[in-house]
Image: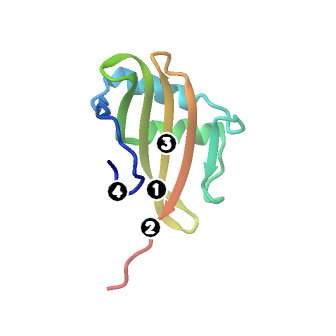
Amino acid sequence: MSQVTGSQHARTEPSTIVTDLPDDTARSVVDNARSLSPDDDRLTDHTGGLMDLSRAMLTTALFDADPHHTTLIPEEPHEWESGTIHLVYQAPCEFPEGNGFVTFDIVADHPTHEIESLEIRTELAIPSER
């Protein structure tokens, strides 16, 4: 019995994910993200005005970005036919305010690779004072 809630917990199976997606799967998802319009409802802009989100910027920045996190999360444990693909890509970027990074957080359906959401964030690199 849980001391926190006073209830009994059923034993659940741990989550299973795939972390080594095939290159063609990741590339297909990124290509689909690159084709989104900046005013698409699936796109969330968290750039703080550091970037002008245009179709050309999306295409170029995502092409230049490197993968930092790629996973497939199945709908049911150990069933890889359907689920959610989660990719995080990042690229160095020069802003008028200084150097930094742009991060693309992409969620897509598996197996269709249709984009469910694309979140774009920017971060400025501030030199440390030593």
Q: Residue furthest top?
A: 81
Q: Earlier in the sequence, mark 4 or mark 2?
A: 4
Above or below residue 30? Residue 102 is below
Q: Residue 45 in the image: x percent, y percent?
A: 63, 49
Between disc 4 and disc 2, the foreground one is: 4
Between disc 1 and disc 3, the foreground one is: 3
Q: Earlier in the sequence, mark 4 or mark 1?
A: 4
Residue behind mark 1: 101
Q: Residue at x 42, y 36 (%)?
A: 87
Cα–Cα span, label 1 and label 3: 13 Å
Q: Earlier in the sequence, mark 3 or mark 4?
A: 4
Residue type, label 1:
Phe
The label shown at residue 105 is: 3
Residue type, label 3:
Asp
Residue type, label 2:
Ala
Residue behind mark 2: 125
Number of marks in the image?
4
Q: Residue furthest bottom?
A: 130
Cα–Cα span, label 1 and label 2: 8 Å
Q: Residue 30 in the image: x percent, y percent?
A: 47, 30
Cα–Cα span, label 4 and label 1: 44 Å
Q: Residue at x 36, y 20 (%)?
A: 24
Residue contact between numbered discs 1 and 2, judged by CB atoms under 8 Å: yes
Q: In which quadrant of the rendered view does residue 81 lie?
A: top left
Q: Residue at x 45, y 16 (%)?
A: 111
